[in-house]
Amino acid sequence: MAVAKFNAEAMEQCRSAVSAQAGQFGAVGDGFSGLYTDPGIFGTLANSGGLSSAAGELDGKAGTEFAAAESLLGKVERALDAVQGAVVDTEGANAASFRAV
């Protein structure tokens, strides 16, 4: 029977790093909030409306992508936490089984 080896410290560092990155993506995404909707910010150019519309669409899509990245990294963090918990539970059960004999 093969013995699985887990580096709990490395898993915790990975989980912590993923958590920090999720927060950073979320913070960047929070900055995208329809700031480019007024065509007047581009002056009196003939295509100010089109440019404003395109900038607004880019703003919306960027915000959506950053939110998706934050959500995905949050799922990775929770999965790593679940793996850590399962490893601890399994190790505890295995240790208890040796004491019970």
Image: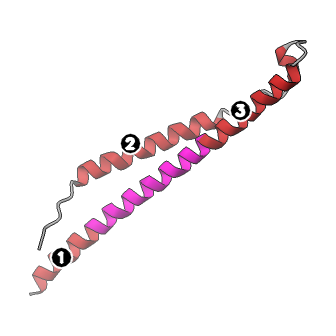
Q: Is residue 55 left or right of residue 62?
A: right
Predominant SS along the magenta part: helix
What SS does tag 1 mark? Answer: helix
Mark found first going from the N terminus, 3 or 2: 2
Eye-nearest disc, 3 or 2: 3
**Residue at image location 41% in from the left, 45% down from the top:** 18
What SS does tag 3 mark? Answer: helix
Provide the residue span drawn in magenta.
Answer: 66-87
Q: Is residue 12 left or right of residue 53?
A: left
Residue to which mark 2 is pinned: 17
Asked whether residue 33 appears in the rendered view, the answer is: no
Tell me if residue 37 comes above or below residue 93 in the rendering.
Answer: above
Indicate the amino acid at tag 2. Answer: Ala
The crowd level at tag 3 (other Cα within 10 Å; few <14, some 14-19, many 20+) is some
Residue 68 at what x, y percent from top left?
58, 47
Residue 89 at what x, y percent from top left?
28, 71
Residue to which mark 3 is pinned: 58
Residue to which mark 1 is pinned: 94
Indicate the amino acid at tag 3. Answer: Leu
Determine the image quadrant of residue 13: top left
What SS does tag 2 mark? Answer: helix
Residue 57 at what x, y percent from top left?
75, 34
The crowd level at tag 1 (other Cα within 10 Å; few <14, some 14-19, many 20+) is few
Q: CA distance from mark 3 to mark 2?
A: 28 Å
The crowd level at tag 2 (other Cα within 10 Å; few <14, some 14-19, many 20+) is some
Q: CA distance from mark 1 to mark 3?
A: 54 Å
Q: Which quadrant would the C terminus be assigned to in this image?
A: bottom left
Q: Is residue 64 magenta?
A: no
Determine the image quadrant of residue 96: bottom left
Asked whether residue 37 appears in the rendered view, the answer is: yes
Tell me if residue 96 comes above or below residue 83 in the rendering.
Answer: below
Q: Is residue 85 magenta?
A: yes
